[in-house]
Image (tube, helix red, strand yellow):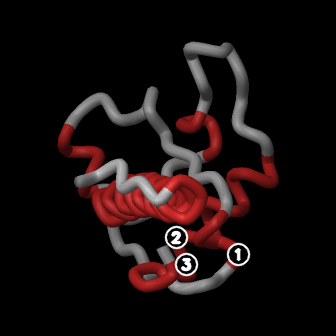
Amino acid sequence: MTKYLGNDDLVFAKGVYPYSYMTSREKFNDTNLSPIEAFYDQVNDESLKIGDYERAQKTWMYFGMQTLQSYHDHYLLSDVLLLADVFENFRNAIMKKHNFDCLP
């Protein structure tokens, strides 16, 4: 994660995504972060907390995002990198404790 995104606290915070807002490919061309209302979670019937939206705004600015496409790509990249880090740590722990490589 740090190799690709750095070591800032923003990198390790849970990302937020405007799932309900993303109804067409044209929205990727938006040049501003979606308004907080766009982050409404329809599945759980919950509004996004202000602090989480502020973190999304900081992420947008910190990484110099220009479009919602760049925010989307960053969100996916951070998810994949975090999963890769978790699995790598799991693999190393199993190797150390049991001398077994789960990816032969």
Left-right relation of 36 to 100: right
Compared with 65, 29 (above or below) is: above
- Asked whether the viewer can see residue 25, the reply is yes
Q: Mark 1 is on which residue type? A: Asp
- Badge 2 density bin: few <14, some 14–19, many ≥20, Cα 10 Å: some
Quarter of the image where one finds residue 32: bottom left
- The one nearer the camera, 86 or 102, is 102
Quarter of the image where one finds residue 67: bottom left
Give percent across and percent down for residue 73.
Answer: 32, 60
Give percent across and percent down for residue 12.
Answer: 64, 66
N-terminal of the two: label 1 or label 3?
1
Quarter of the image where one finds residue 84: bottom left
N-terminal of the two: label 1 or label 2?
1
- Badge 1 density bin: few <14, some 14–19, many ≥20, Cα 10 Å: few
- Residue 9 is marked as 1
Left-right relation of 59 to 9: left
Q: Decide: marks 2, 3 in contact (CB < 8 A)? A: yes
Residue linked to disc 3: 61
Please tell me which residue is depicted at 35% across the width and 49% down the height of the picture: 102
Q: Secondary structure at mark 2?
A: helix
Q: CA distance from mark 2 to mark 3?
A: 4 Å
Please tell me which residue is depicted at 19% across the width and 41% down the height of the picture: 25
Residue linked to disc 2: 60
Q: Secondary structure at mark 1?
A: helix
Compared with 9, 73 (above or below) is: above
Q: Mark 3 is on which residue type? A: Met
